[in-house]
Amino acid sequence: MINFDNVSKRYPGGHTGLSHVNLHIDPEEMVFLTGHSGAGKSTLLKLIGLLERSSGGQVHVNGRNLTRLKNRQIPYHRREVGMIFQDHRLLFDRTVFDNVALPLVVSGLGHKEIGRRVRAALDKVGLLHKERAAPVTLSGGEQQRVGIARAVVSKPPLVLADEPTGNLDPELSQEIMDLFSDFNQVGVTLLIASHDIALIRGMHKRILTLSNGSLVADSKTEIRDVT
Amino acid sequence: MSRKIRKRFPVHIWLQRHAQVALSSLGRLSRNALSSLMTCAVIGIALALPIGLHVMLHNLQQVSGSWESGASISVFLKQKVSDEQAAELAEKLRRHQRVEQVRLITRSEALEEFQRQSGFADALQALDYNPLPNLLFIQPKNDFTTADKAQQLVQELRLLPEAEIVQLDLQWVRRLQAITIIAQRAVVVLTALLSMAVLLIVGNTIRLEIQNRRTEIEITKLIGATNAFIRRPFLYTGFWYGLFGGLIAWSLVALAISLLSGPVATLAQLYESSFDLSNLDAGTALILLGGSSLLGLLGSWLAVGRHLSAIQPS
């Protein structure tokens, strides 16, 4: 599903986001990405969602070489990658329903189909009764669940989450993680960045560790590169 | 590897989407009614100026056109030509192939009329002779009433030994026409300049709108919206600005014409004319509305092209 071949990312000004990362994630895997702040977790996710382009190496996602993808093709790639953010990134002038519907509106689905799918997604995250509510009236945990519903509503094969539980208490965080497990059960590939080691250890999934832009540990291969 | 990732929408969904975006951008404008109205009013006033001038010129041309077709020629005869000679000449000219009608106004008739109308009766009686010449008032045949043809007849009449002055009563109409042509050019220049102003007004308004909706644009891009999708509401907003600006321009011109038509009718009556000030005709109105909508669309297109690509999600 995701393949990084000697991928580097340098920012203008000399800061290195990632250096020479090799990585392979199979379809239907659920993988955690951890490391201290600035280790390159967000950069890695941004390269997959094409919010950034790599400065070297090849990135393949879902059988597509992102290095060669033209700018005008980026929107079509993003439709196949659901993205979840720590700050939710909801549109506050629209209802919960309209926020979740946005990816379907963008891909040009019919009215009825949109209603059906949005309600299914909201039902899945337990917010069906809030579909007419404005996002500001929701709690942080609820807003994050709206963000999750929006990321999965178009049934993308791959979902990325950047610190999805960053602002939530442990109980809510666990609920969110269980939700991700449910998606993984039905075949969605997930890549979740989090620095909450205790939480992700409890999930018993593959964990990748980044440090200073390099991949230093992979629980699947148990190759450890002591730094 | 080169899997096709573009998907085409069915046509009815595409239309449905356009109608939805058109209505929602209209709704957005109505939520900020006052500022939207002010933008439209600025566009309306900018467009009303050249359109109003165009309508006035059109009216002027109609008036001068009707005068021109009534071209007539005055032949003032020499003092030594007697009344009998004048009558003979009039008779001769009546048989001329280009002449429809000849009216002889003898010097005594002219004096009488002058005394009656000018109020100089006493002063004229003080003269011991009649200073006025005999006058032949010639109406050319219909085919020769246009300025150029009438001019040929004038040349011919000037060769008559009896004629002192031959005057085509058209000179000032032609001068007026020359001025009208200059004014028309001025309207074209003015239209171009003010259209540019409308482009800038719409462009700037849309630029601000894009800045206000920056977060929304970023999020929509994250979710996989194409540039066309993001551009669309802004283009419709520009279109509405143009259309409403055009409607305001139309009503301003109509209002101005209706305010002027009363005094103009009075003036026309004084000239014994039944001239009526004509308003913007349907064709010109359509061109105005179409043109202003197009300007709005173009203005927002320019703004969107410049500013939208600068916004990228991070």
Image (spheres, helix red, strand yellow):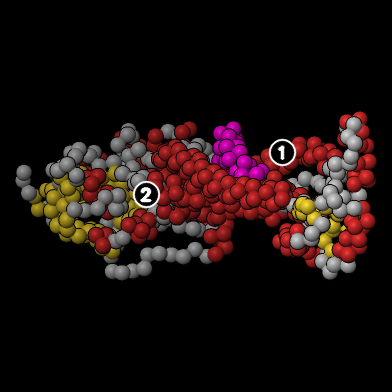
A164 horizontally vs B34: left or right: left
In the image, the segment drawn in magenta is: B24-53
The answer, for residue B283, to whether it is visible in the render is yes
- Near-viewer residue (B129 or B303): B129
Assign a secondary structure to mark 2.
loop
- What whole-number distance in Å separates the C-alpha atoms at marks 1 and 2? 44 Å
Closer to the chain start, of discs 1 and 2, is 1
Give the image location of residue B208, x and y in percent.
45, 38
Extreme-left residue of the structure = A226
The answer, for residue B145, to whether it is visible in the render is no
Assign a secondary structure to mark 1.
helix
Q: Name the residue under label 1.
A: B256
Three-letter residue code for mark 1: Ala
Give the image location of residue A27, x and y in percent.
28, 61
Chain of the residue under label 2:
B
Residue B309: assigned label: 2
